[in-house]
C-alpha cells in the first residue's frame, strides 16, 4: 500500500486521537501522523508548516477534521482555512469526522465541497483508511 507524507488529526477528543493515531501508525500509511486538539492550534500549525508550499512540490497530505469541537468547530475551521494567505489548500485532502450525521451537517459539508472530500462517521477503521489511501 502506498504512503502519504503526513496525516493531521484535528480533534478535541484525545481518546479518539489516540485510537485513530494508533490505527494509522500500525497500518504504516503515512510517514508522519500528528494529532492537534483544537482548530486554532491546527490553523497555526498549517500557517507555520505549509505557507508558500505547493501540492506540486510537496504532494498532498490528509487532514481528518472533527466536526464538533468546542472553541472552533470543523466548519468554522474550514472558513478560517480558506482565509489563510499563502496556503495552497489543495495540499490537503480533508475528511470530516463526526459521531453522527445530521441533516444540517450534510448541508454544511456540501457548502465546503471545494475542499472537503467526504464526511465520515467515527471511528475510523482500516477499511475506510485503505479506501482513502487508494484515492490519493
Image (cartoon, rainbow, N blue to C red):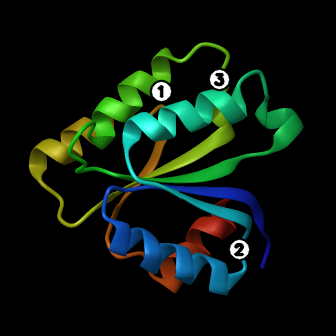
Quadrant of the rendering where the N terminus is positioned: bottom right
Asked if residue 109 lies left or right of residue 86, the reply is left
Instruction: Specify the quadrant of the image occupied by residue 45.
Output: top right
Q: In the image, which disc is placed on residue 81?
A: 1
Rendered position, 127 above or below 101: below
Mark before the other along the chain sequence, 2 or 3: 2
**Label 3 Cα neighbours within 10 Å, binned few <14 / some 14-19 / many ≥20:** some
**Label 2 Cα neighbours within 10 Å, binned few <14 / some 14-19 / many ≥20:** many
Q: Which residue shows up at 58% across the image and 66% down it?
A: 132
Q: Are marks 2 and 1 in contact (CB under 8 Å)?
A: no
Q: Mark 3 points at which residue?
A: 87
Q: Which residue shows up at 84% across the image and 41% down it?
A: 58
Q: Distance between the residues labelled 2 and 3?
A: 24 Å
Q: In the image, which disc is placed on residue 68?
A: none
Spot occupied by residue 7 in the image (x, y as percentages of width and height): 62, 58
The residue nearer to you, when weighing 91 against 35, is 35
Rendered position, 13 above or below 86: below
Q: Which residue shows up at 45% across the image and 75% down it?
A: 18
Spot occupied by residue 118 in the image (x, y as percentages of width and height): 42, 54
Mark before the other along the chain sequence, 3 or 1: 1
Camera sees residue 10: yes
Q: Tell me the element at label 2.
A: loop
Rendered position, 132 above or below 9: below
Q: Mark 2 points at which residue?
A: 29
Q: Residue furthest right?
A: 57
Instruction: Specify the quadrant of the image occupied by residue 24.
Output: bottom right
Q: How far apart are marks 3 and 1 (CA)?
A: 8 Å
Amino acid at each position: 500500500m502506498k504512503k502519504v507524507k503526513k496525516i493531521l488529526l484535528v480533534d478535541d477528543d484525545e481518546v479518539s486521537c489516540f485510537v485513530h493515531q494508533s490505527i494509522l501508525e500500525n497500518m504504516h500509511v503515512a510517514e508522519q501522523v500528528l494529532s492537534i486538539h483544537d482548530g486554532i492550534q491546527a490553523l497555526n500549525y498549517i500557517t507555520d508548516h505549509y505557507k508558500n508550499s505547493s501540492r506540486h512540490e510537496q504532494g498532498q497530505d490528509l487532514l481528518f477534521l472533527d466536526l464538533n469541537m468546542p472553541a472552533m468547530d470543523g466548519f468554522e475551521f474550514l472558513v478560517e482555512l480558506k482565509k489563510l494567505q499563502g496556503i495552497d489548500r489543495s495540499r490537503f485532502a480533508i475528511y470530516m469526522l463526526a459521531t453522527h450525521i445530521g441533516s444540517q451537517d450534510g448541508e454544511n459539508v456540501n457548502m465546503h465541497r471545494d475542499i472537503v472530500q467526504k464526511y465520515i462517521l467515527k471511528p475510523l477503521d482500516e477499511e475506510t483508511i485503505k479506501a482513502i489511501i487508494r484515492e490519493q
